[in-house]
Image (tube, rainbow, N blue to C red):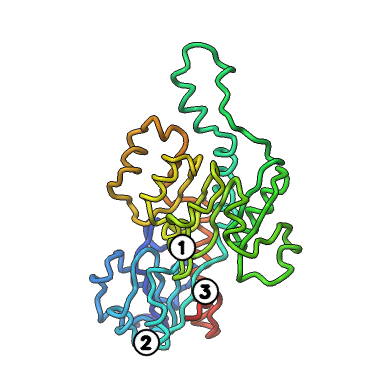
Amino acid sequence: MAKASMTKYVVGITDHMIGQPDLEASILGDAVEIDFFDTTDETLFDPARLARLDALMVWGARLGPRSINHLSRCRGVVRYGVGYEKIDVAALTQADIRFANNPDYGTEEVADHAMAMILSLHRRLWEHDARARNFSDGWQVHSLKPLSRSNRSTIGVVGVGRIGTAVINRLKPFGFRILGYDPHQPPGHEKAVGYERAERLEDLLTQSDVVTLHCPATPSTKGLMGADGLAQMKPGAILVNTARGELTNDLSALEAALRSGRLAAAAIDTLPQEPPGPHPLLDDWRQRAAWLAGRLVITPHNAFYSDDAAIEMRSNAARTVQILLIEGRMRNQVLN
């Protein structure tokens, strides 16, 4: 006699950066059938397959009304990452489908990545490396100026949530003065964590030798460090963005700030378009233009990554789905 199927639920996974979703399947167990769409192209999602789903996990795909309208059985959508600008949360709310992101993974990795960028640019390491290749006379005499001590410098942290707090904790032993701006944190948060609260973003920008971004992309933060934000920065400051590309979405303004010296340097992990297309600033970066030597550092949106973080991200997202299906509770729920 054939064994009766144990399947109770169907969980869809739109796409995956790391091969097949075997880890997710092992966590969700035999009572769950995994339907792997294996594409980031929303137009390729089969309506009939969407209609079978009890839950949906999303990695890099967009999810809008064209798909959400077919999720007739779906109880919740879970985004593998922290950001969710590609997810139409309003449409999910309209369809009475709960949504959660995955904020509790990779905190250490992003904070470490930001710290590596901050310290390397503050010490002008990449610029030293680029210029030293051409030194033929003298060696030690080629010091770069200005070059300030850590305890004479101010770091401005924009967004003091999980990652911003982890960055502050890493900055403290170096002796930096630390300013933090986050209107969503309650009064006294700065005392608990250990930073000086800036009541206005402008106050932080005008005082900081390094500004590091750790806030989400929302209607109020998109373009935060465009032409206006860059113009408010202290002359000769450094900008670090390991948060969202939409925060620094004006590459022409960034180029102008670097060319004029308003910015001494910038380190970017997230770009407004990925992979990035042609742009004069990026073209010069690719060609190692002399004027940018060691002043613009770009990493391919992998600040979050380590072998451990990848496992943590997948495990946490799968457990969020598991809790939803078994207990009916959505952890990390994002409200529209």
Q: Is residue 157 left or right of residue 18?
A: right
* Of callouts 1 and 2, the N-terminal one: 1
Left or right position of 275 against 166: left
Mark 2 or mark 3, which has the lower sequence index? Answer: 2
- Label 3 close to label 1 by CB (< 8 Å): no
Tell me which numbered mark, 3 or 1, is placed earlier along the sequence: 1
Give the labeled residue for mark 1.
Answer: 23
In the image, which is nearer the foreground, mark 3 or mark 1?
3
Q: Measure the alpha-carbon separation of dots 2 and 3.
A: 18 Å
Q: Is residue 229 left or right of residue 273?
A: right
* Label 1 environment density (alpha carbons within 10 Å; few <14, some 14–19, many ≥20): few
Question: Residue sitting at 37 percent across and 74 percent down?
Answer: 12
Residue at image location 55% in from the left, 74% down from the top: 332
Residue beneath disc 3: 320
Q: Position of residue 308 (x, y in %)?
A: 54, 53
Residue at disc 3, secondary structure: helix
Label at residue 73: 2
Q: Position of residue 33 (x, y in %)?
A: 38, 75
Q: Viewer-nearest of labels 1 and 2?
A: 2
- Residue sitting at x 52%, y 78%: 333
User: Can residue 161 be seen?
Assistant: no
Which sits in the foreground, 79 or 144?
A: 144
Question: 81 or 91, which lies in front?
Answer: 91
| Residue 201: % across, % down | 58, 61
- Residue 159, above or below 287: below
The image quarter containing residue 260 is: top left
